[in-house]
Image (cartoon, helix red, strand yellow):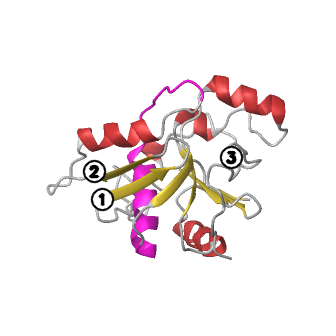
C-alpha cells in the first residue's frame, strides 16, 4: 500500500478525526508518564535533532537542525518549523511543541527517508469552523487548533507501516486514514482511531 502519487494536495488534508478532540486538562509540556523514562522537555524519542518537512499546499520544504549539540532547541529552526505548519486560511502561525517535532523526527529517522510530507499542521479556529460546516468528521476542539497535531505521510512508506510505527511510540493520538492517504499524529492523550 504505497502512497504513490496520492496527490498530496488532494490527500484529504482537511479531513478531521473523530478521536482527536482536545483535552483541556492535558498539556503536552507535562505529558511525561511516571516511570516512563521520558525526558520532561520532549517525548524522549529525541531522534537525531534534524527534521525535513515538505508541505504540498505551500510547495515549501524546510530542512533544519532543531537541536544544538549541547541539547538545546535552536530558535531559528523552530521558527522555520512554525512557518511550514502555518494555517492554510489565514497564514497564522503558532508555536509547535517540541514533542511533536521530536515525534516527526523519530518517524523520519525510523524510516530513513529524506523528508516527511506535512499534509496539515496548525489550523486556525476560523478554518476549523469552516471545515466543521462542511464535514461532520471535523472535531470542534481539534488539536490542530493548538498546534499539537500533524497529518502526514511518508513517500515510499506503506501507510499501514507508518500507522503501526506511530502507534508503537505511544506518544499521543494516532488516526489512520487510508482512503485519504495520511496518518494523524498528535501529542495529546494516547488514543487510536
Q: Is residue 69 left or right of residue 38?
A: left
In the rendered view, does 106 fall on the left or right side of 56?
A: left
Quarter holding the N terminus is: bottom right
Question: Which numbered marker is on residue 50?
Answer: 1
Please identify the quadrant where the C terminus is shown.
bottom right
Point out the tag, 3 or 2, that comes first from the N-terminus: 3
Q: Is residue 110 left or right of residue 14?
A: left
Write down the residue under mark 3: 20
Q: In which quarter of the view is residue 181 placed? A: bottom right
Q: Nearer the viewer, residue 80 or 27?
A: 80
Mark 1 or 3, which is nearer the eye? 1
| 176 w.r.t. 134: above or below | below
Q: What element does badge 1 sit on? A: strand
Q: Earlier in the sequence, mark 1 or mark 3?
A: 3
Q: Is residue 101 magenta?
A: yes
Q: Secondary structure at mark 2?
A: loop
Left or right of 123? Residue 59 is left
Residue toward you, 70 or 55: 55
Mark 2 surroundings: few (<14), some (14-19) or many (≥20) residues within 10 A:
many
Amino acid at each position: 500500500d504505497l502512497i504513490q502519487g496520492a496527490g498530496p494536495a488532494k490527500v484529504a488534508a482537511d479531513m478531521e478525526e473523530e478521536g482527536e478532540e482536545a483535552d483541556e486538562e492535558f498539556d503536552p509540556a507535562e505529558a511525561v508518564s511516571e516511570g516512563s523514562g521520558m525526558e520532561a522537555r520532549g517525548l524522549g524519542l529525541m531522534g537525531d535533532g534534524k527534521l525535513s518537512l515538505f508541505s504540498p499546499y505551500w510547495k515549501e520544504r524546510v530542512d533544519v537542525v532543531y537541536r544544538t549539540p549541547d541539547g538545546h532547541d535552536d530558535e531559528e529552526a523552530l521558527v522555520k518549523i512554525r512557518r511550514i505548519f502555518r494555517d492554510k486560511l489565514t497564514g497564522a502561525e503558532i508555536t509547535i511543541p517540541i514533542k511533536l517535532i521530536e515525534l516527526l523526527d523519530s518517524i523520519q529517522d525510523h524510516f530513513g527517508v529524506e523528508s516527511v510530507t506535512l499534509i496539515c499542521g496548525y489550523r486556525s479556529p476560523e478554518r476549523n469552523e469552516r471545515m466543521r460546516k462542511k464535514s461532520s468528521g471535523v472535531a470542534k476542539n481539534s488539536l490542530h487548533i493548538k498546534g499539537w497535531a500533524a497529518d502526514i505521510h511518508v513517500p515510499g512508506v506503506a501507510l499501514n507501516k507508518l500507522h503501526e510505527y506511530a502507534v508503537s511510540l505511544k506518544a499521543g493520538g494516532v488516526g489512520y486514514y487510508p482512503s485519504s492517504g495520511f496518518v494523524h499524529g498528535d501529542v495529546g492523550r494516547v488514543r487510536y482511531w
